[in-house]
Image: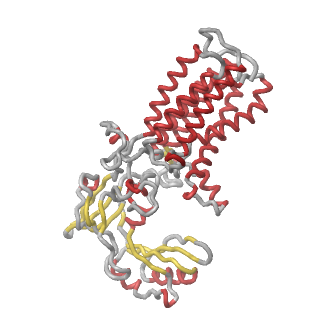
Amino acid sequence: MHQVLFHIPMTAGWFPPSGVPVYGFGAMLFLTFTLIAMIWGPRRCEKVGLPREKLQDLAITLFLTGIGGARLLYMIQYSNQFSWNNPARLIGEFFQIWNGGIVFYGSLFGGVLGYVVFYRVVLKKLHISTWKMADAIAPLIALGLAVGRIGCYLNGCCWGQPVCVECQVVPLSAVSPALGQFPLLPAHSRDQVTRPAQAGDRLPQIHGLQTTTGFSLRSRPPFGEGDPRSIVAAVEPGSAAAQAGIQPGDRIAGLNNGPNQIVVELTGSADAVTGAVSLLTAAGGTAGPSESHSGDMLYATVAFDDLTAYTMAVRKLPSRNQGGPTATAHDSLWELARDWPRGVNTLSLVVDRDGQQIPLAFVPRTVPFYPTQLYETVSMVLLICLLLSFQPFRRHDGQVMVLFMVGYSVHRFFNEAIRIEPTYALGLTLSQWISVGMMAGAVALELYLRATQPRLPAGALPLQHGVGR
């Protein structure tokens, strides 16, 4: 998984400090658009009478409506992750495709809508046959899926089920575990595999499979009593943390080239939090950014480098009964692991062990997952070969698209069986039900085309220009 492929060198020192990032997911989307709209697409679509410049207009239209539909379907399927009661925030979340992802079937709906509009505005005037066009673009869709799923793999989304004794549903592959282990901290699966199982979890067997960093921590002392900075309680055998040398009893003293600060978290009324922040910063703390919550509630943090300064400062805080805020204490490691930055994989620590400061660095990795993203890439490459081989033997225009619909629906139905998705009626996921509908649609479309389209002669050319719908 490489969420960030690289940073543009000449932008280093700007915002962000390391330079403008080039994300793996976005790079694959750009590559998909380039291959389809600039390279292969024009060669195929010009044969059915579509000028190159019109193809680029069509590609942009389908790209935008397809991505929009794919994102919208994802947001509907995982509605609990989004702020539907806050329209302004919801609009921002819509464009954050890297948070969660997209659903291909949504792109079909969006793409069909975009094509209908484009056909009525442009293609109908050029007398372009819809079914010849469908045969031309069917392999292009498969190519987009093949390249796009590599972007999903780089982003760490759309993963399959964990490959473990308790939950594996197909024989363990010798290749899958290596391909399906992602850097844990930025992985989208982290919440499900590290959080303890709770009542109502859809698949409780995938929760609590590992710790967030490869080691667990001792319980922190009560607020204001003792040092709340992390102390290692146990290390996962065979984990990257164990291989790096983390040991039980290690106290985390440094983090990513800086100190592991004590962080006081304050929540309450604006007046209470503001007063507490002023008191703590006057005693040597460093205030973090404040965030507003509903109503008059405010959230803020204050960090301390020195344990003594922290202990003396928090003793002066008024309790909730005295009008003070709710206060808790943890450390920078807890803060960073909770809101880990995208594209950063390595965790650098300095541990205090028997009075010695020992630097350690490692990449915490997830348990193995089935790399269903790459399974789809391979499947789509094979489907492209099938579509191109079948094209001269099609009975009528539109049959290549029918074959694509059949091939993809079969692939997606079975690929979904080893993914972790919400299930609905009969225990099938939304995408599996859409696959069933797509297969039925392919059968209906084939019957319709047989009744309305002229039969092509045996050995027909791959694509021929013609008019009609």
| Residue 251, x across and y down, in percent | 27, 68
| Residue 45, x across and y down, in percent | 65, 22
Q: Pick the residue in front: 406 or 121.
A: 406
Residue drawn at the location 54% of the way across and 48% of the way down: 425
- Whether residue 231 is visible: yes
- Number of marks in the image? 0
Which quadrant would the N terminus be assigned to in this image? Answer: top left
Q: Is residue 304 left or right of residue 133?
A: left
- Name above or below for residue 350 compared with residue 40: below
**Residue reaching furthest to the right:** 125
Residue drawn at the location 39% of the way across and 61% of the way down: 197
**Residue reaching furthest to the left:** 354
**Residue reaching furthest to the front:** 426
Q: Pick the residue in front: 254 or 69.
A: 69
**Residue reaching furthest to the bottom:** 322
Q: Pick the residue in front: 219 or 36.
A: 219
- Whether residue 39 is visible: no
Q: Is residue 69 left or right of residue 159?
A: right
| Residue 459, x across and y down, in percent | 59, 9
Which quadrant would the C terminus be assigned to in this image? Answer: top right
Quadrant location of residue 327?
bottom left
Q: Is residue 457 left or right of residue 177?
A: right
Q: How is the image coloured?
A: secondary structure
- Name above or below for residue 364 compared with residue 463: below
- Name above or below for residue 184 compared with residue 466: below
| Residue 343, x across and y down, in percent | 45, 50
Residue drawn at the location 46% of the way across and 61% of the way down: 200
